[in-house]
Image: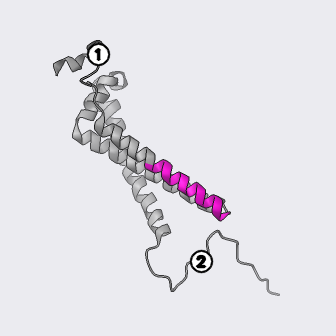
Amino acid sequence: MSATIESPNYAYPARSKRRRGPNLEKAGWIFMRASGVVLVVLIFGHLAFNLIWTPGGIHAIDFGFVGGKLADPFWRVWDVTMLWLAILHGSNGMRTIVNDYVHKPAVRSIMLWALGIAAAVLIILGTLITFTFDPCPPTADASLLPSFCAER
């Protein structure tokens, strides 16, 4: 007696053996693993610097600390790299979930576009804020500025 098992109803048909070009799903899978490893290093480096190596620990973190940290190009690049990888890693994970659980093509397309737009907006705004942050704006009232702004 033999039983025939029907092919499961996948959202996407099987990849054709004749099809050429990049395998984007494989690239996404590899990106998730690589970005996860890099994110662990970036996040623990961020936490170690802010909480362990900074004199005063968590009590030293205030507006002045953040302003001074964002004035250093090294930390700007570190934070922007962490931001970009976290958003791309998270949105790629959400893309995978949408592809796995949303079966209607129109709804899937709308959700993937919304996800892409949200990720792009967050990356643009986060990068813009990181590189244009000025704790001592020249037009601000001097009484409202932190004490280290008087040195300018």
For disc 2, the marked residue is 14
State the image coordinates of residue 52 (x, y, percent, origin top left).
Answer: 32, 31
For disc 1, the marked residue is 141
Q: Looking at the image, which residue is at 64% across and 62% down?
A: 106
Q: Which residues are magenta?
A: 104-120
Seen in the picture, residue 150 relative to 125 is either above or below; the reply is above
User: Quick check: is 118 in the magenta stretch?
Assistant: yes
Residue in the foreground of this view, choosing between 91 and 30: 91
Residue in the foreground of this view, choosing between 10 and 125: 125
Q: Looking at the image, which residue is at 29% across and 20% down?
A: 140
Q: Regarding mark 1 in the picture, which secondary structure is present there?
A: loop
State the image coordinates of residue 111 (x, y, percent, origin top left).
Answer: 59, 55
Seen in the picture, residue 100 relative to 39 is either above or below; the reply is below
Q: Looking at the image, which residue is at 47% across and 49% down?
A: 119
Question: What colour scheme does the image use?
Answer: one colour
Q: Tag on residue 85?
A: none
Q: Quadrant of the N terminus?
A: bottom right
**Which quadrant of the structure image shows residue 31?**
bottom left
State the image coordinates of residue 51 (x, y, percent, origin top left).
Answer: 35, 30
Q: Which is the main secondary structure of the residues drawn in magenta? A: helix
Q: Quadrant of the C terminus?
A: top left
Nearer mark to the viewer, of 1 and 2: 1
Pick out the residue farthest to the front: 139
Which residue type carries mark 2? Ala
Pick out the residue farthest to the left: 152
Q: Looking at the image, which residue is at 49% across and 54% down?
A: 116
Q: Regarding mark 2 in the picture, which secondary structure is present there?
A: loop
Which residue type carries mark 1? Asp
Q: Residues within 10 Å of mark 2 (few under 14, many from 20)?
A: few
